[in-house]
Image: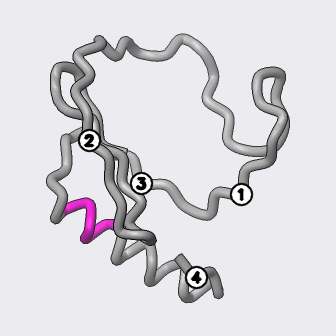
Amino acid sequence: MRTKTGAKSKIFDITNGISIEGTDTTLRPLADTFFRVGSTTIDYNGESDISAAAIYSAYLTDSEINEVAAVMRKRMARLGITV
């Protein structure tokens, strides 16, 4: 996902070659709650399996996101995970 205040947000499913783009001008204030990655919280009854995450403070271009995806795929392949 790529998003910032006042710009089009874009969701990428690079594995399946799908992306969705839309305009969202909603301000994104800093969160005042904890961010948890993992299984079961009060608001989330599912399970999460996250092997890696890349979070940037800059708005990446589509080609930069594809570069990050290539690095992630290489890492996942070493772990035996196909994406």
Q: Indicate the amino acid at tag 3.
A: Ala
Task: Return the disc, 3 or 4, that comes first in the chain's sequence.
Answer: 3
Spatial CA distance of label 1 from label 2 is 26 Å
Q: Residues within 10 Å of mark 2 (few under 14, many from 20)?
A: few
Circle nearer the viewer, 1 or 2: 2
Disc 4: which residue: 82
- Please state which amino acid type lies under the numbered disc 4: Thr
Amino acid at dot 1:
Asp
Disc 3: which residue: 54
Q: Marks 3 and 2: which is nearer the front?
A: 2
Q: Is mark 3 on a helix, strand or loop?
A: loop
Q: In which quarter of the image is residue 44?
A: top right
Residue 48, position as x, y percentages in the image: 73, 50
Q: In this view, does 16 lie above or below 44?
A: below
Query: Relative to residue 18, is residue 59 depicted above or below?
Result: above
Circle 1 is placed at which residue position?
Answer: 49
**Callout 4 secondary element:** loop
1 or 4: tag closer to the N-terminus: 1
Q: Nearer the viewer, residue 79 or 6?
A: 6
Direction from residue 30 to residue 42 in the image, left or right = right
Cβ–Cβ under 8 Å for marks 1 and 2 = no
Residues at discs 1 and 4 in contact (Cβ within 8 Å): no
